[in-house]
Amino acid sequence: MRIPATRAVVIATALALLPVPAAADPVTDLDRLAGQLAAAATATQVDQVLDTLPPVLDDLGEVTESQDALHVLANTQAFVRTAGDLPIAVVTALLPGLLNLLAALIGQLRPPQLPLIPLPFPFPQLPLPHP
């Protein structure tokens, strides 16, 4: 026996079952890389983070439309390109702060994440006092 289903139900079910990789959010990747860079003690560790940063920064350009965030992003990308020529102490002192600033700028402008499938119950309505 075959149960008829609408396309919307099939698509919603398929989307709900899709595993979302941890690397799907570039802001999460940026926070992780900033932490790794702050903890880096050797040139090899710094180089690994610097090699990983350009694709994450490129993804961040697609996530935001904020002119402030795009300006900081362009400066961060330029710094990452030249960071290999700088002493490790300078890179580990400056770049984590730039990455945290960029994550904060992008994070405050992002819409809240909503569930793909509506919940079977409504959210409670809390009465707010009127001034």
Image: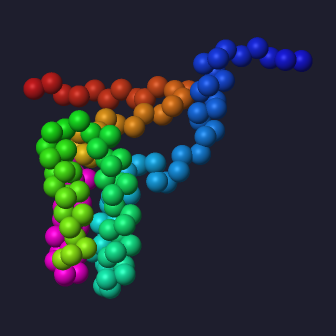
Q: Position of residue 10 (x, y in %)?
A: 66, 24
- Answer with left or right where residue 50 lies relative to residue 100: right
Q: Position of residue 87 (x, y in %)?
A: 19, 81
Q: Position of residue 126 (x, y in %)?
A: 32, 29
Q: For the point 23% across and 39% down, which residue is it?
A: 109
Q: For the point 19% across and 28% down, which residue is it?
A: 129
Q: For the point 89% across and 18% down, which residue is it?
A: 1
Name above or below for residue 65 compared with residue 7.
below
Q: Seen from this angle, which residue lies furthest bottom?
A: 42
Query: Is residue 101 in sight in this rendering?
Result: no
Name above or below for residue 13 compared with residue 99.
above
Residue 83 vs residue 109, the one in the foreground: 83
Query: Is residue 8 in sight in this rendering?
Result: yes
Name above or below for residue 116 compared with residue 99.
above
Q: Quadrant of residue 55?
A: bottom left
- Answer with left or right where residue 118 lies relative to residue 8: left
Which colour assignment does the render follow?
rainbow
Is most of the magenta stretch helix, strand or loop?
A: helix
Quarter of the image with the C terminus is top left
Residue 131 vs residue 120, the one in the foreground: 120
- Answer with left or right where residue 89 lies relative to residue 63: left
Q: For the point 62% across and 25% down, which residue is it?
A: 11
Q: Position of residue 45 (x, y in %)?
A: 36, 79
Q: Seen from this angle, which residue lies furthest right?
A: 1
- Answer with left or right where residue 99 lies relative to residue 56: left
Residue 30 vs residue 118, the one in the foreground: 30
Q: Seen from this angle, which residue lies furthest left?
A: 131
Segment colored magenta? 87-105
Q: Is residue 101 magenta?
A: yes
Q: Is residue 69 magenta?
A: no
